[in-house]
Amino acid sequence: MNTNPDFPYRLYLVTDEKACLGRDFFQVVEAAVKGGVDLVQIREKELSEAAFLEKTLRLRELLDQYEVPLVVNDNLGVAQQSSAAGIHVGNNDTSPQQIRNAWAGCGILGYSLEDETQLQLPHAQLADYIALSPVFATPTKTNTIIEWGLEGVSRIRSLIAKPLVAIGRVNADNAAGLVQAGADCLAVVSAILSAPDPAKAAEDIRNQIEKAL
Ligand code: TZP
Ligand code: MG
């Protein structure tokens, strides 16, 4: 378990409006925050640039009330224009090097690790946290390479000291195991956004995390 004071987050909500099943996006996210989410990433792949910026600004305003930082998925312009806390990128996105060069105000730079060879890339070395993507195969994101599983989490934990985020079919049943394997923070889409009671779902996962720490 990592006690990095720069990355104290434990339950990371990654958005996908579709996963809200027609309910109001902002209300669902707010409920999740009340339930124990302490970091949010806006990841809306189907929006135009303008709509993504507008949604990000509105979400930032909401999250500011709770002092929950907002990370923007793979869009440096929107991240900067919204004065977000940070940005999350994958291997085919804007590189961490470009982000560091262009955005001095980037507080949280996340990088998705899809296989172990990527640990050697400057991308991984420049990141503030590494997301193991996916820990378990998930219908929410299917263009992935491997699933890390608990063994993958333990192996990467033994190799790096940076905060490790686990993402991919994370729920209240597998949360404790992921933390015991070495994850510092769990990132969740559908187990919270699609739950009948998103606040309760977040609270259940958060409780499992806290118990396992
Ligand atoms: N990156 C790796 S898996 C994933 C992302 C964005 C989606 C996780 O969604 P869910 O619904 O929590 O499995
Ligand atoms: Mg991406």
Image (tube, helix red, strand yellow):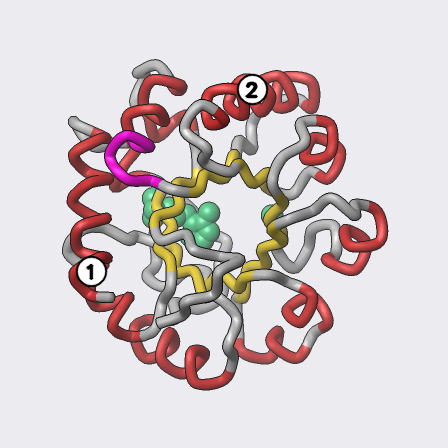
Q: Residue at x 63, y 62 (%)?
A: 127
> Is label 1 in contact with label 2 (beta carbons under 8 Å)?
no
Q: CA distance from mark 1 to mark 2?
A: 31 Å
Mark 1 surroundings within 10 Å by alpha-carbon count, few (fewer than 14), some (14 through 19), many (20 or more): some
Give the side of residue 17 with respect to residue 115, left or right.
left
Quarter of the C terminus within the rendering: bottom left
Hey, what amino acid is under mark 1?
Answer: Asn
| Quarter placement of the N terminus | bottom left
Residue 55, disc: 2
Q: Position of residue 143 (x, y in %)?
A: 50, 53
* N-term mark: 1 or 2: 2
In the image, is residue 203 above or below residue 100?
above
Q: Main secondary structure of the magenta part?
A: helix
Residue nearer the viewer, 139 or 136 = 136
* Numbered disc 2: secondary structure: helix
Which kind of residue does numbered mark 2 sit on?
Lys
Q: Place residue 146 in its image quadrant.
A: bottom left
Q: In the figure, 8 relative to 200: above or below?
A: below
Residue range highlighted in magenta: 32-37
Residue 174, label in figure: 1
Residue 172 % position (x, y)? 18, 51
- Tell me where residue 176 sits by quadrant: bottom left
The residue shown at (50%, 77%) is 161
113 and 62: which is toward the camera: 62
Residue found 84% across the figure and 53% down from its top: 101
Residue 159 drawn at (x, y percent):
49, 84
Kindly tell me whether residue 132 is visible in this rendering.
Answer: yes
Q: Is residue 159 magenta?
A: no
Quick check: can you spot residue 142?
Answer: no
Number of labelled discs? 2
